[in-house]
Amino acid sequence: MPSPRTFLVTLFILIAGHSHSIHASEDGALLYAQNCAVCHGNHGNGGVGVPLALPDFQYAVTDRFLELSIRHGRPGRIMPAFNQLSDKQVKAIVKHIRSWAPGKPISFPTITVEGDPAKGKVLYQQNCAACHGTNGEGGKGTGVTFSRPRGLPIIAPALNNSGFLAAASDQLIKATLMNGREGTPMVSFLKQGLSEKDINNIVSYVRSFENQLSANPVPRENELAHTITYESDYSVEETVAAIKLAATGKNFRVIRIQNLDNGFVEENKEDDRKVIIYFCNFEMVNDALLIDPRAGMFLPCRVTVVEKDGKVSVHAINPKWLSYLFNNAELNRLCSEMLQTYISIIEEATL
């Protein structure tokens, strides 16, 4: 039976479509298919991730923006950092993305926008906050249809994100505000009546986010225990009964109880000393799925009771590890609450 860590890492790789092989080909199309297509679409038409093939996107961004976005990702916003890729592999992916660009390559001037961030803040709240968040935290959800309005083709990016601010130049932000991005909800604010001076002020305000980045980062892997483990002084049967009672007392419904090796061995040969208890709180499930539908891979909640060498122990996956695996800071609160619930249920059943 694989360890929880091995199982979850394998599952995440399959979900996210990542290739962790440092020996992968430098074929940009292949690397894109392995690392990017699951979110951005096979032909860059978008999905969970922004559509990369849009002409307005291709005209607005530099190769450097694409390279830094791949390298740094968007911490806490679904897009992971692809540290396992070499610089040649990153450039190969960018070259493949550029194959969708219509016309000739674009030359981008390097400019620093001078504006008034205080005035920009007022304009930002009036024109940008509804999509990008009051504090630049971005639209809610992942881009999966279940977690966003069906009429919204993409989730608005987070602007107070360290990955975005490291990759996006002043010129890129300004050009996007001035020209909009056809095929998305991002309109041209020049056409909406703002002056170039107004736009410069907004750019300066967005740049000021570098001094006040979101204080809700996804935890690093080495900061987290992957599982919760408690010893029980009771038998397997008594511990299972106590967990059922404790879960019910926390407003969870017990869904089913099964042997851990059910399906892995012949029927009627399961080990009764290894038992999984599945339980669910449907309000919590709904909240989790609205934030990130991938969380459904870990639901309903489950606790495993194992007897080995005459000792009984209780195990559960640490819910806070979800935020690390899914790179979604919105899950932090829910995962922290679920961790405390797990601990409370297990302690009540074993103490």
Image: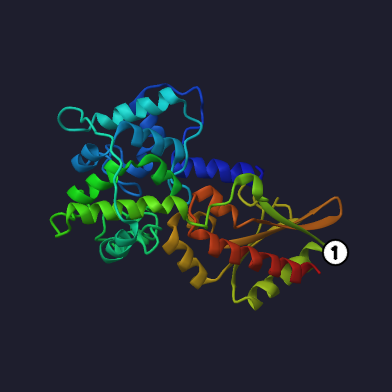
Query: Whole-percent x and y of residue 290?
Result: 42, 63
Q: Is 253 on the left or on the right of 261, as rendered? A: left
Quarter of the image for residue 171 reads top left
Which quadrant, please, contains the C terminus? bottom right
Quarter of the image for residue 231 reads bottom right
Q: Nearest the camera: 115 or 123? A: 115
Quarter of the image for residue 149 reads bottom left
Tell me, yes or no, if residue 180 can be seen here.
Answer: no
Tell me, yes or no, if residue 237 can be seen here.
Answer: yes
Instruction: Identify the colour scheme used.
Output: rainbow
Query: Whole-percent x and y of residue 168?
Result: 35, 42
Task: Residue type at mark 1: give it.
Answer: Asp
Q: Is 252 on the left or on the right of 53, as rendered? A: right
Query: Whole-percent x and y of residue 187?
Result: 19, 55
Judging from the image, what secondary structure is the residue with disc 1 in?
A: loop
Q: Which residue is mark 1?
A: 233
Which quadrant, please, contains the N terminus? top right
Residue at point 50%, 50% (across, down) = 326
Residue at point 78%, 62% (across, down) = 236
Residue at point 48%, 60% (across, down) = 330
Q: Is residue 296 above or below residue 91?
A: below
Question: Tag count in the figure?
Answer: 1
Q: Is 19 on the left or on the right of 101, as rendered? A: right
Query: Whole-percent x and y of residue 264?
Result: 63, 46
Q: Is residue 341 above or below residue 137?
A: below
Q: Nearest the camera: 121 or 284? A: 121
Mark 1 surroundings within 10 Å by alpha-carbon count, few (fewer than 14), some (14 through 19), many (20 or more): few
Q: Nearest the camera: 334 or 3? A: 334
